[in-house]
Amino acid sequence: MASSAEERGKDGQLAASGAGGYAREMPPTTSGAGGPPGNIYLLSSSFNQDYSCFVCGTTAGFRVYKAHPVEEVHRRETPPALARKSVVMIEMLFKTNIFAMVTTTDDAQVPYKVHIWDDSKQKIVGELRSRNEVKGVSLRRDIIVMICEYAIYVYTCSKLEVIQHITTIDNSRGLCALSPTGDPWILCCPVFPKGSIKVQVGKDNAASHVFHAHETALAAIVLNETGSLVATASETGTVVKVFATTDGQLLYRLRRGAASADIHCLTFWSDSFLAVASSSSTIHIFKLDQDCSAKDGNDDDDAQFASPILAAAEDPADPPPLEDASLESKLASQIQQAVTKVASRAETVTNLVKGVVPSYLTDLRSFAQFRLPDMDSSGQPTVDARNSQARIFGPRLAFHPTEPRLSILHYSGILYECTFKMDHDMANGTQDCGLLRATTWFAVRPDFKVQGPNTRVATVAGGVGEDGDEGAEEWQLL
């Protein structure tokens, strides 16, 4: 590893009113609390929109890192505006100096505000308020999104004015997917009835729509870069689905496994791959092969393959597990390829095959897998750097921008980088990713710092695009 893991512990306008509901306390983690005085623990972590950097909120401010290679850019623990504050959620706007963060103090443990931090000025330059607990925050160059348990508010970056109010179903997870680029912006969130998703296309309510994705409540949502595709997972956690945002058409069904699991993170890469992180110690990478898409066939006659706007694609009953999981994966992969080959010959054969082959055998299987090291017999990391109030429930994933490489940001304080072969033949079963490196980026002792060749990364003023678009004046001090 790049750094030693020793000594790490286990432990209306601005005052917008939220929808009805109540604040819930986060369930405590299994470790991280009660450490020696002075130790610093993780509360949140996330990659920026292009995966070039990541940021973490701690019990004493926040820290910013460069992703390739991993190195700490700076930490903010001493400014007066952050005194006695824990950063429970934080998002970074590309490579700019602008951050959106949710903080708490010893006196107020429930967060009701989102602060806009301008790092070039070392101070808070904006504030969004809610009467209900803030469950999440997301941003892009033109809007900021505040997620509460029963409502989502969209603000302009220019004047921090509310331009959209969306009523959601119970959203204690703070689920909300926002396309980082594209015009107009696209947002996806869970709404009533259970298992449904609303696609909000900018301020145009006429272009927005709702479709049914799962029979059980949603556990994860992510959009691709332009907002044309949305991937979803339910609380069952056996199947991940990919839809077109334009009409809610089901495009792919991805089989993660037969046993239920809590899916924590979904990540696209070039609209061709999707990575999935769950409560298990295995990371799955799926190849979105158009020849195996779920939209083939007669949509009107087969409810399983119908547009989810008209009928839900139900999560099928799980098959009895085989004694050898690798044998199940290889068998399913071979059956899937045989089905695809036969089904491509004639439409009548396609419908026949779909009617007799169980859906869990025709679902796409993972193209590659990576098993996290340093896990105990129960699948938990041997080291846990989280605080008991942390908003981190699983690893965060990010693909390398140009190479077949996946970064796994783990709350153990280690970032794993694994590689896979894009030309892998699925007839040989699922490939195992190779471990490229593991870097300890965080430890609970205050003096820990990962070392790198540089200590600074180029940034631009808040609101200014990386290609020079003006907009610094849009950020106004309240």
Image (spheres, rainbow, N blue to C red):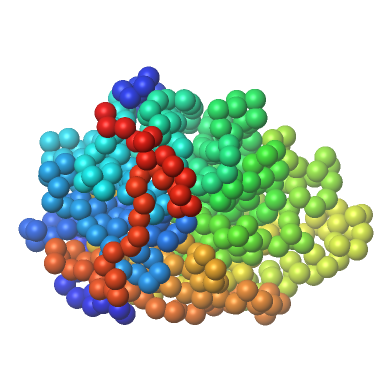
x and y percent of residue 106 in the render?
Answer: 13, 40
Q: Residue at x 80, y 43 (%)?
A: 299
Q: Is residue 441 visible?
A: no
Q: Residue at x 45, y 79 (%)?
A: 435
Q: Quadrant of the N terminus?
A: bottom left
Indicate left or right for 32 with 92 as reference: left
x and y percent of residue 14 in the render?
Answer: 33, 25
Residue furthest to the top in view is: 12
Q: Quadrant of the C terminus?
A: top left
Q: Residue at x 77, y 61 (%)?
A: 291
x and y percent of residue 410 in the render?
Answer: 35, 64
Instruction: Classify residue 213 by image quadrant.
Output: top right
Q: Is residue 228 above or below residue 442?
A: above
Q: Residue at x 36, y 22 (%)?
A: 13
Q: Is residue 180 visible?
A: yes
Q: Is residue 38 above or below residue 440?
A: above
- Of 103 and 337, nearer the camera is 103
Residue furthest to the left in view is: 37
Q: Is residue 237 above or below residue 286?
A: above
Indicate left or right for 234 with 428 as reference: left
- Of 273 and 9, nearer the camera is 273
